[in-house]
Image (cartoon, rainbow, N blue to C red):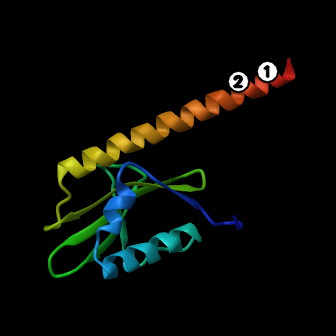
Amino acid sequence: MMAGHAAVVWEGDSRAVIKSFPEDAREHLGGDLRRMQNGEVPLDFGPMAPALPGAFELRDRDKDFWYRVLLKRIDGTIYVLHCFTKKSNETPRRDVKTAKGRLKNVERRLAAQEKARKHAEKNKRT
């Protein structure tokens, strides 16, 4: 992977959901995700605080729906937590809850990996 290029990890059904979005929305959101991977600023995004501190939403819209990708960058990796559509400016609680649950899973996984790494490092020295 080139320097500054972040990996993307899709949580839950996020990848399948975004693939169900219309082509234009996929292109716009995919372009913004690529910009983030390359360390650039997405064209249409916003913070999810206070609901999801440190997380962001990528945004697109057509005449029928608002398309959203909720994500968080942790240690050089972009975790796509949840993708969904909505019909108003307000983000439904169930979608925030889904993203929060997936973020907790990511954090638990990363903590377990770090613990295993430290354990292996300690055993290497003994």
Q: Nearer the viewer, residue 63 or 56?
A: 63
Disc number for residue 73: none
Disc number for residue 123: 1
**Amino acid beneath label 2:** His
- In the image, is 35 to the left or to the right of 98? right
Location of residue 92 (image quadrant): bottom left
Residue 56 in sight here: no
**Quadrant into which the C terminus falls:** top right
Mark 1–mark 2 CB contact (< 8 Å)? yes
The Cα atoms of the two marked residues, 1 and 2, are separated by: 6 Å
Q: Where does the image place residue 104, in percent across and percent down from the top left? A: 40, 38
Q: Residue at x 30, y 75 (%)?
A: 60
Location of residue 88 (image quadrant): bottom left
Residue 19 in sight here: yes
From this view, report whether residue 103 is shown above or below residue 45: above
Q: Residue at x 42, y 50 (%)?
A: 11
Q: Residue at x 39, y 73 (%)?
A: 29
Q: Residue at x 42, y 38 (%)?
A: 105
**Mark 1 Cα-neighbour bin, 10 Å: few <14, some 14–19, many ≥20:** few
- In the image, is 6 to the left or to the right of 126? left
From this view, report whether residue 18 is shown above or below residue 100: below
Q: Where does the image place residue 56, in percent across and percent down from the top left? A: 39, 60
Q: Nearer the viewer, residue 101 or 12?
A: 12
**Mark 2 Cα-neighbour bin, 10 Å: few <14, some 14–19, many ≥20:** few
Disc number for residue 119: 2
Q: Where does the image place residue 89, in percent across and percent down from the top left? A: 17, 67
Q: Secondary structure at mark 1?
A: helix
Q: Nearer the viewer, residue 36 or 19?
A: 19
